[in-house]
Amino acid sequence: MLAETATVRVTKNGNAKTLAVPARVAELATVDVGDVFQVHAEGNDRLVFDRVTSPQVSRYVGRGRDRVFEVGPEGFLVARRDTVTLRPVSWDF
Amino acid sequence: MASPARTWPPGRSDFLSEPDDNRPIWQGDIFREVPFGVVRPNPQGRRPLVQTDPKNVVVLGYPCEMYEGSRLADPQVVAVVRPAKDAGVIEDFFQRRTPPGAYGTCPYPDAFSDGALWVADFRVITVVSSSELTRARRAAVMTEYGLAYFRHRIAAGFTRVPPQLAIAEQAGREQWVELELWTSWNQLGISGDFQKWMETFDANLGSTPRDLLEGGQFSALHAYVLSLRSSVP
């Protein structure tokens, strides 16, 4: 868990908008140049960044039918609160 | 590697494409009006009621398990595909940019080219005879990105621990190339059994095609299959 928070100002970068991660926060989160994140908005006031793992933490192992794709724990998302309440399934779906 | 949808919200063409009869039936294919068996309680007696109504379905099985060699195995596992509003999924699901919810479903934009949002509902699953999954009933197939998203959603639906989309794409790359090769094989009218060829040592390749596929030699395999065209009478 990060122990520090910082204010981040948004700047314009062509058609994109840039958020500069303060060095101390980047250090605590081990964010480095070239790292890739998926980002999505939650509501109007929250951005969530999920690290996209580098290929090194996922690889194929085995051969033929025994071949499987191994993914490290960083390669998975943890589901958040479900924002959609599905209708219950009835027999007349 | 398939690129993520360039725009968000994704449109139909990001996830789905028109079926080509040369493309083998594959995980994620959507079919219209397939007899869908349901065994439900019978309020009048002890024997349950068996219902078989036509439903739109999506094939759930992983390709390795869908096929015995090059033959579509029997039966096939499918989930019902229904209008999103019937499942309780909001029409602006993708527009909200917060798509992690509705875990029991995989939303499809415009699945039947009707402008509506549809969903595969993982809560309603059955097995059907593979003979019912005809090419004439196949309404749509998935793009590489769509298939990665579909698998991501299957994992979310049953485990709540889905892989990152990029990981789902990476994991599916080999299998996607195999699908492309098989489709080319059919398009070119190459005689012989594709899956048998994949497992057989080929002196021109110096190994089995499967070994090359697992070694990531995708371009070489594509080129080699194209070269086989000359062997077609």
Image: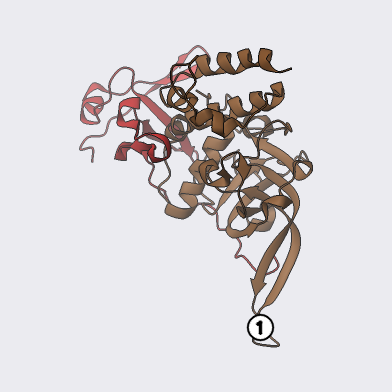
Q: Is residue B97 above or below residue B174?
A: below
Q: Position of residue B14 (x, y in %)?
A: 63, 30
Foreground residue, A66 or B38?
A66
Crowd rating for badge 1 (residues with CA inside 10 Å; few <14, some 14–19, many 20+): few
**Residue B99 appears in view:** no
Task: Please tell me which residue lies in front, A44 or B85.
Answer: B85
SS for callout 1:
loop
**Residue at mark 1:** B47
Residue B211 rendering spot, x and y as whole percentages: 43, 25
Residue found 48% across the figure and 16% down from its top = B205
Q: Amino acid at mark 1?
A: Arg
Name the tint of chain B in the rendering: brown
Residue B27 drawn above or below residue B80: above
Q: Chain of mark 1?
A: B
Give the residue drawn at x 61%, y 12%.
Answer: B227
Residue B146 location (% of width, % of height): 58, 35
